[in-house]
Image: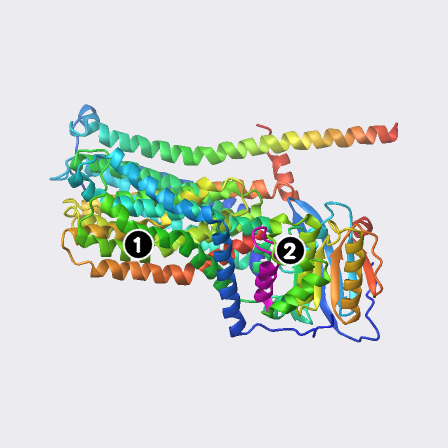
Amino acid sequence: MNKPLSDGAGSDISTWQAFCATLKRDLVIAFKRKNDLLNPIMFFLIVVSLFPLGISPDPVELSKVSAGVVWVSALLASMLSLDNLYRADYEDGSLEQLLLSPQPLYFLVLAKNIAHWLISGLPVVVLSPLLAYMLYLPSEAYWTLVLTLMIGTPVLSLFGSIGVALTVGLGSRGLILAVIVLPLSTPVLIIGAKAVTDVMFGLPVGSHFALLGAILALALTMAPLASAAALRISVN
Amino acid sequence: MPSLQFSSLAEFLQMGGVYTFHIWAVYLLFAIFIGYNLMQPRMARRHFIREQKRRASRDAELASKSRENINS
Amino acid sequence: MWLWFSKLGSPRWFYELSNKWLPWLYVAMMVLMSVGLLWALLFVPEDYQQGQTIRIMYVHVPVASISLACFPLMAVAGTITLVWKMKLADMVAKSVAPIGAWFTGLALASGAIWGDQIWGTWWAWDARLTSLLIQFFLFIGVIALRSAIESQDAAAKACAILAIVGAINVPIIKYSVEWWNTLHQPASDFSMDPVAPNPPEVWVPLLIMISAVYVFFVIALILRTRNEILQRERRSQWVIDLVSREKSV
Amino acid sequence: MHTNLHNPDSGFSSLLQASALFCERDERVLFSGLDLTVSAGELVQIKGSNGSGKTTLLRILCGLNEDYEGDILWKGESLSEERENFLSSMIYIGHRVGVNRILTPRENLRWSASLHAPIDDNRIVAALGRLGLRAYEDIPCRNLSAGQTQRVALSRLLISPACLWILDEPFTTLDVHGVKHLESLLSEHVNAGGAVILTTHHALNVSCQWRALDLDSRRAAA
């Protein structure tokens, strides 16, 4: 049994390994529960197909709103699956182990956010052309839609992670999560949906991508720090 | 010195006739806003003091009762 | 350093200080408010475009500008709570949230009513109104989070984080809403910014109204913070003495 | 009030030193002015009735709970500066043991090991084997009993280099055999120069240097 009683100060390599291990763990957990993987996708599909029922089947009508509908549904889909980001770990105590790791919490939280995005954000991005087709989105806007969603959905996950971290210890989490996270994600929604509609009118969209990239950079640097601080508070 | 805009009270209340409701609605909301945010804290304070007084008297009562059965 | 700083910010010191300042603030508010209102209602000339509805500006602009200051103030109070763990800062942060919501709400209502004469509808997705609406949701988010968390300290720190994150996002939201809105309709033809083109007899009363509403904001904040102090220090001796001195109401 | 028995032969300086700890929960003072020094080669059992603040004290010592006054030193340095070194040489197992029910014991251990210092697989299998989970490495933890889940968490102690163990009620779900086994584990660790802080209602018999700190009698005395 006698292993060396070293003090084991953390080093960069082990930070990278902790990052990968946490990312791998979350993905393994997700893929072990296959049916949960479908939830964000099915939700996205259902919400998008509700809009034509609500608006009208007429192609001209739908193509005008298609960009906005796909974007709002993507926002709601990523919001829906946020809840199990920290919830399971909080309940079985793994979150405490995460907080007590010598590795910087920023990277561990970032790993969890990336895993969440891969599970709930990426399928939405991959599926969006199909749904856009269902809503008669003009063909030249497909690439813009996919690219804006590709940049936008990580921001939704990162900001959503702050909201979930703040409310992980609470009983009634659902409503508060929405009230906290949705206002924060309005800029991404506005710019993303606008980029797609502007492409339809043939307007240049360079500035839209610049803005989305800027918000993504802000989210990538700031959001995990806020989530880490929020987790420390919720778990104490 | 800026000149008085309205010749009579009636004209003042009309506020230019067309948007009378709009203007007075805004000022009514403004009055409610000022009134509520000044009154509510004072009411809450009065409620708090009444609450604390009741608790203080209850504690005093309990203390005196326990002292009685110690002496008796 | 931390102990000295927390002594300075002790709730009791703030309570006694506010006892001295409140009467003067009330006087200042009364004077400024009455002068401002009378001037705005009676003496401001009719606007060639808007007619009498220019008088709504004297409520909307002061309230809207101060509502913009509430979120940063809450974020600063939150930072002080997080960094120096000062109880008084958290009490101020907790009191600012409802006041901010009230200010934003009134700014929203007065803006919509004022805009009605141009757009013909009670609600138009004008850039300023939309960013006020989203700011209102942010305030509701902070208040909801505050009431959801039972323990006082956890709620203080959680709301501080949300206030900081929110404060960072308010300008982004404001910018993206304006950017989203201006490209759709041409900028609305009358400008809500007061000082620029208007003659002095229009913006002088406005500055008076802005300072009046600002003094009111300080008074409302102090009143709510005092209640918060009494509530949290109800077990300490100085509050018990204070309660016993108060005549029973 | 507490006897500060430095272990004479090991001569190690104090590992964890808490002084004048004050903690208040929901307007109720759990403990105030509490001093505790834990040196290498020593086991400290925190005793006290339910709600006396045992768990809160452990969570404060391990850095999870920062709502306290007073200061904590790790090897003479303030905890906040030495946080990384402290965390890499400490393991905390709480009521919620931190074992994910969907993953298998192997995957759980591989992840919690990677948080400190990654290790190869056969040491994980050896640790699990030592705690009587030989054939259970690859069964999802939801199929394990509470006692077995506890053993999965305890096997983390074997694979990590940490010298300070902070355990909250480690004996609760263990059977008689498991209890004896854990006690020998603790004795080995302490005699090898490690330190353990734990809470338990179980009558502890370990063959190593140990003392008790009773929160109830402390409060009665204060």
Q: Residue furthest right?
A: B72
Which of the pair D6/C118 is nearer the observer?
Answer: D6
Q: Amino acid at mark 1?
A: Leu
The image quarter in which residue D20 lies:
bottom right
Residue A124 in picture, x, y percent from top left: 34, 50
Of B10 and C210, the residue lying toward us:
C210
Identify the residue shown where x is 58% and y is 63%. Answer: D110
Element on which disc 1 rests: helix
Query: Is residue C219 in sight in this rendering?
Result: no
The quadrant in which residue A202 appears is bottom left
Please name whichever residue, A157 or B14, is drawn nearer the observer in this view of the structure. Answer: A157
Q: Which mark is residue D68?
A: 2
Residue positioned 24% across, 58% down in the render: A208
Of tags 2 and 1, which is closer to the observer? 1
State the residue position of label 1. A149
Instruction: Please name the amino acid that badge 2 sits on.
Output: Tyr
Q: Is residue A61 left or right of residue C209?
A: left
In depth, the one of D140 and A19 nearer the eye is D140
- For the point 31% across and 45% down, which residue is it? A72
Residue C145: horizontal and vertical position, in percent?
48, 44
Q: Which mark is residue A11?
A: none
Provide the residue span drawn in magenta.
D97-117
Residue D46 in magenta?
no
Q: Secondary structure at mark 2?
A: loop
Q: Chain of mark 1?
A: A
